[in-house]
């Protein structure tokens, strides 16, 4: 079958779907949607349709990125735009579908927005919402809008036209096109993609390999997983193009086993490609052969580093090796190997489909295109976003993210995952690009972005990230193996109130040594949380060490709970709910916390009636309270109020 015939077949199926007289219901069934209850919503939809005898086509799609609004469904009536509904619950499905499908009431009160041509009264265009308006969806253009398990949907929307175009070009011309686009590696290092390909293309040897790094291991990161779940063919198309450009006949996708849905859809996509002659031998009659295997990773964070990843594919323990030689010269089994991350490959397909000049219009002079981020933490609207490089942190956090939860104050944002840096409010107007983030002491990373508010202790947050990177260190080189442990020990002492003079200087010395002496990127970037928090939040370290005080009231060993005698009404609510029976008192008696028993859980503070507000949490401060229960001084209410 020629590519023209493939396109015609796909276009015919897509048009048939669009012109169908049956309504369509799209359900966000990515991992985030399923975690939020999409499975129960799907069941409720099926039950409603069967009960009412309504003929409708139900399609499971990937994540649209609005994770805060999951579970999401889209309803398309014939000749109408798609209406998107968020936070859908199984018990509300029946009424919603009944109102719209049977009574033509689109329920503007429940709708997020509409997509497509036309207009729906009372409902805004989805892409005019503040969460989506600043975004530029290139890589994520299909996610949530097509069936990721149907190759025809991808092809009907321009898919594989980039590969078809590439097969008519010389490998050198393809590499030049990638270079002109300005695409840089989206895995974190930001190395120019075209230049990397050129090294591998020119490397001596007839046997070469292509690898897709899908070993996404950063806490709170889900960019690659969502893309593979929502649009796997975009990644696979990019890989075939890259293989043709460098002269590789074999490729691997290294994806962690914790991504079962992504793996399932990748396997299905590869099978569909084989049926259409888009992979395998003599691709589209070009004489070019390329085969892809999937390698499941066991979840080691260090295997995100390319040489450790290659060792794992070879069946060895995932540990990095010194470079040079770089993988482009000597990689998998000693052969020239090109490794790019999931998002990079998806960009490749898009560049060949649309052209380098079109792609280069987005971003900045040195950081072209867009970048996906997993925006998580203390923001109102968490989710997967895609923005042009050069956008500011403020725009991401406040315009797209909706600001800080519960109106709290912004404190810091960590970019680049556990190896990234923590940036303060003074840098909110900094552009998000490779150079600016590096200058600030952080990194782009693969796209994790964690927001912290005023209630976050930066010392404790740093300890958390060091706990992760230290546990994930492969142990091969002493600077990382020993240095991360030493830094973690110091941070643990500090948050436990045992910090001492000289700890800050010692942390700086060790961090610098680890950064300069480690073998791979994991060790070289592991000190970033330490160095940036010392740079921007040094006063918090000093408060912990010198005053034995946690300004954010987080570190348990440095906080104390008291019951204020002039506010306690002896209602006994806190005493009855204390999990360790650390509160003494009786009805109409001022309660007292036995500090020797208190585990600092905060239950008493959370449960004390707001009209009393008798429980307080302090750090570095002592409040005089009775040692034994005494009669309540003045009653402002009773336990029955």
Image (spheres, rainbow, N blue to C red):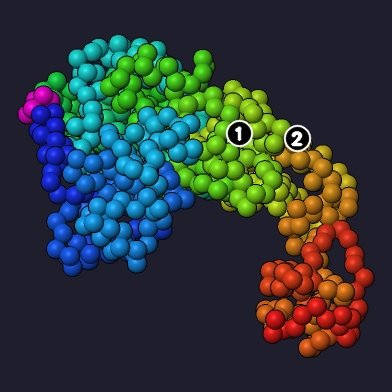
Q: Left or right: where does residue 9 sit relative to residue 158?
A: left
Q: Does the segment drawn in magenta span residue 503? A: no
Packing grade of label 1 (10 A; few <14, some 14-19, many >=20) is: some
Relative vertical location of residue 191 with respect to residue 399 in this rendering, above or below: above
Q: Main secondary structure of the magenta part?
A: helix
Q: Give how far across and how far down residue 208 sits, in percent.
A: 31, 25
Report the residue at 42% width, 17% height from top.
Answer: 360
Which of the numbered marks, if any, corresponds to residue 201? none
> Dividing the image into 4 quarters, which one contains the N terminus?
top left
Relative vertical location of residue 173 with respect to residue 425 in this rendering, above or below: above
Q: Give how far across and how far down residue 463 sits, in percent.
A: 68, 50
The part of the chain drawn in magenta is: 1-6
Give the camera-side residue of 401 and 148: 401
Q: Left or right: where does residue 183 sit relative to residue 172?
A: right
Task: Compare marks 2 and 1 and give the one earlier in the sequence.
Answer: 1
Q: Give how far across and how far down residue 61 sits, in percent.
A: 29, 47
Q: Does the segment drawn in magenta span residue 2? A: yes
Marks 2/1: CA–CA distance: 20 Å
Q: Give how far across and how far down residue 166 sits, in percent.
A: 24, 18
Q: Which residue is mark 1?
A: 394
Q: Left or right: where does residue 208 sit relative to residue 286?
A: right
Report the residue at 75% width, 83% height from top.
Answer: 638
Q: Left or right: where does residue 51 sit relative to residue 115?
A: left
Packing grade of label 2 (10 A; few <14, some 14-19, many >=20) is: some
Report the residue at 32% width, 25% height from top.
Answer: 350
Q: Nearer the viewer, mark 2 or mark 1?
A: 1
Residue 510 visible in image: no
Which of the numbered marks, if any, corresponds to residue 535? 2
Residue 566 visible in image: yes
SS class, disc 1: helix
Q: Residue 559: which quarter of the image?
A: bottom right
Report the residue at 27% width, 34% height from top.
Answer: 117
């Amino acid at each position: 079958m020629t590519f023209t015939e493939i396109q015609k077949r796909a276009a015919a199926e897509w048009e048939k779907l669009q012109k169908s007289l049956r309504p369509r219901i799209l359900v966000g069934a990515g991992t985030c949607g399923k975690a939020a209850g999409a499975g129960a919503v799907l069941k409720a939809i099926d039950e409603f349709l069967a009960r009412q005898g309504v003929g409708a086509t139900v399609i499971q799609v990937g994540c649209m990125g609005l994770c805060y609004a999951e579970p999401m469904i889209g309803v398309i009536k014939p000749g109408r735009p798609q209406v998107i509904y968020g936070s859908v619950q199984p018990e509300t499905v029946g009424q919603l579908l009944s109102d719209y499908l049977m009574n033509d009431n689109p329920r503007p009160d429940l709708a997020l927005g509409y997509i497509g041509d036309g207009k729906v009264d009372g409902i805004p265009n989805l892409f005019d919402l503040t969460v989506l308006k600043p975004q530029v969806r290139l890589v994520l253009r299909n996610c949530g809008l097509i069936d990721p398990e149907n190759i025809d949907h991808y092809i009907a929307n321009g898919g594989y036209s980039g590969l078809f175009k590439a097969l008519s070009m010389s490998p050198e011309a393809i590499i030049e096109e990638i270079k002109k686009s300005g695409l840089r590696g989206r895995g974190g290092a930001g190395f120019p993609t075209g230049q990397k390909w050129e090294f591998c293309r020119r490397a001596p040897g007839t046997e070469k390999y292509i690898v897709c790094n899908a070993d996404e291991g950063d806490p709170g990161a889900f960019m690659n997983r969502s893309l593979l779940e929502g649009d796997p063919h975009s990644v696979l198309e990019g890989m075939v193009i890259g293989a043709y450009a460098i002269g590789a006949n074999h490729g691997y996708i290294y994806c962690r086993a914790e991504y079962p849905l992504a793996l399932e859809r990748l396997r299905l996509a590869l099978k569909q490609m084989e049926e259409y002659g888009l992979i395998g031998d003599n691709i589209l009659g070009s004489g070019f052969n390329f085969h892809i295997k999937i390698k499941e990773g066991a979840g080691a964070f260090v295997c995100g580093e390319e040489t450790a990843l290659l060792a794992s594919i070879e069946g060895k323990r995932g540990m990095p090796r010194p470079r040079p030689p770089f993988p482009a010269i000597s990689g998998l089994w000693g052969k020239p190997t090109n490794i790019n991350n999931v998002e990079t490959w998806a960009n490749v397909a898009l560049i060949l489909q649309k052209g380098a000049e079109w792609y280069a219009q987005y971003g900045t002079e040195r950081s072209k295109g867009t970048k996906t981020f997993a925006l998580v933490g203390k923001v109102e609207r968490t989710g997967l976003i895609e923005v042009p490089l050069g956008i500011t942190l403020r725009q991401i956090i406040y315009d797209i993210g909706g600001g800080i939860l519960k109106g709290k104050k912004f404190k810091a944002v960590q970019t680049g995952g556990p190896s990234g840096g923590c940036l303060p409010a003074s840098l909110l107007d900094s552009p998000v690009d490779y150079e600016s983030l590096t200058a600030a002491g952080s990194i782009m990373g693969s796209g994790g972005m964690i927001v912290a508010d005023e209630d976050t202790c930066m010392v404790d947050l740093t300890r958390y990230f060091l706990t992760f990177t230290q546990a994930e260190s492969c142990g091969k080189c002493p600077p990382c193996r020993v240095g991360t442990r030493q830094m973690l020990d110091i941070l643990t002492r500090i948050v436990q109130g045992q910090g001492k003079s000289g700890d800050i200087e010692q942390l700086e010395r060790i961090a610098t040594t680890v950064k300069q002496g480690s073998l791979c990127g994991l060790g070289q970037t592991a000190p970033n949380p330490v160095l940036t928090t010392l740079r921007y939040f040094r006063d918090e370290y000093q408060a912990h060490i010198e005053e034995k005080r946690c300004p954010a009231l987080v570190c348990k060993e440095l906080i104390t709970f008291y019951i204020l005698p002039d506010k306690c009404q002896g209602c006994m609510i806190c005493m009855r709910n204390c999990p360790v029976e650390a509160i003494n008192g009786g009805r109409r008696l001022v309660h007292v916390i036995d500090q020797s028993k208190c585990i600092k859980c905060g239950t008493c503070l959370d449960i004390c009636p707001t009209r009393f507000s008798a429980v307080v949490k302090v750090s570095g401060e002592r409040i005089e309270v009775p040692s034994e229960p005494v009669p309540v001084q003045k009653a402002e209410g009773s336990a029955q109020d």
